Amino acid sequence: MMLSADSIGKFVALGGTFHSHLDEKERTYRWPDLWVVPDDGIVPEGEPIEIPPQTDQIKPGCELTAVIGEELRQASEAEAWDGIKGFTISNDVTASGDWPGWSDPDHGMVTGVGYKVIDTFSPILTDVVEKRDESHYDNLEVKVRVDGETAVSGSTAQMAFTIPEMVSFASKVTTLRENDVVALGDPGNPTVFLDDAESVTCEIESIGSLTSPVERL
């Protein structure tokens, strides 16, 4: 199966879904964070991640991403699983420096997701791998390589929620339709930033790899 950037409906992104990421931030979540990526944030494999001059500390995030095959609204976990037609990979690129609103020290909180939805910051692999048994996704290796150097090494075994839980949750916020995608979070803790990188590759066992060049505007 193939997607194109034009054929993707909504790009729903979830955060706070991996124990490793939550441990990094010393948090526990009852449910994931959720935001919707604007169209200009979505780019296919091979198109560049463009880093604006006002941003720094750019982090990659390799994410198993569910591709929806039928309408889901207020779906149960069983309905959510049945409504997934396959999986692909996306890269949740994040500006974690002082701009644009990573956190506000005066309020002690994150002020928004502007640092997540910058143009080109959500590359996605257009190859879709047909869904297998749910247990197949319990312990898939997740890696990020920046200019060939391993920056993230994790596993879907670190997920704090099941895939059906996450897609069901998303369907209770916004109706999911065919070719919508739901990015299911990443292990976090990258050791290398993208600020001066030339390329980044996200790899998930049995799903494939997504490579993007990196450019400074």
Image (cartoon, rainbow, N blue to C red):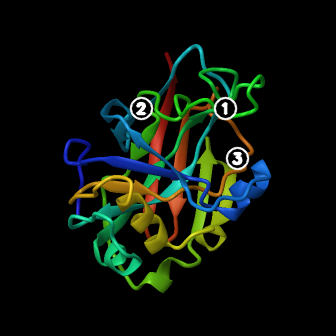
Considering only vertical position in the picture, is 16 above or below 216? below
Q: Residues within 10 Å of mark 1 (few under 14, many from 20)?
A: some
Point 57% across, 14% down: residue? 53
Nearer to the camera, 216 or 120: 120
Point 48% across, 71% down: residue? 165
Considering only vertical position in the picture, is 201 above or below 184? above
Name which of mark 1 and mark 2 comes first in the sequence. Answer: 1
Disc 1, disc 3: CB below 8 Å? no
| Type of amino acid at the residue the image marks with label 2 | Thr
- What residue did someone put label 1 on? 96
In the rendering, at what x and y percent does residue 172 appear?
38, 60
Q: Nearer the viewer, mark 1 or mark 2?
A: 1
- What residue did someone put label 3 on? 190
Residue 192 sits in which quadrant?
A: top right
Point 72% across, 59% down: residue? 28
In the rendering, at what x and y percent does residue 67 appear?
32, 62
Name which of mark 2 and mark 3 comes first in the sequence. Answer: 2
Q: Secondary structure at mark 3?
A: loop
Q: Nearer the viewer, mark 1 or mark 3?
A: 1
Q: Residues within 10 Å of mark 3 (few under 14, many from 20)?
A: some
- What residue did someone put label 2 on? 120
Is 178 left, or right, of 35 in this rendering? left
In the rendering, at what x and y percent does residue 162 appear?
53, 73
C-alpha separation, residue under disc 1 versus residue under disc 3 = 12 Å
C-alpha separation, residue under disc 2 versus residue under disc 3 = 19 Å
C-alpha separation, residue under disc 1 versus residue under disc 2 = 16 Å
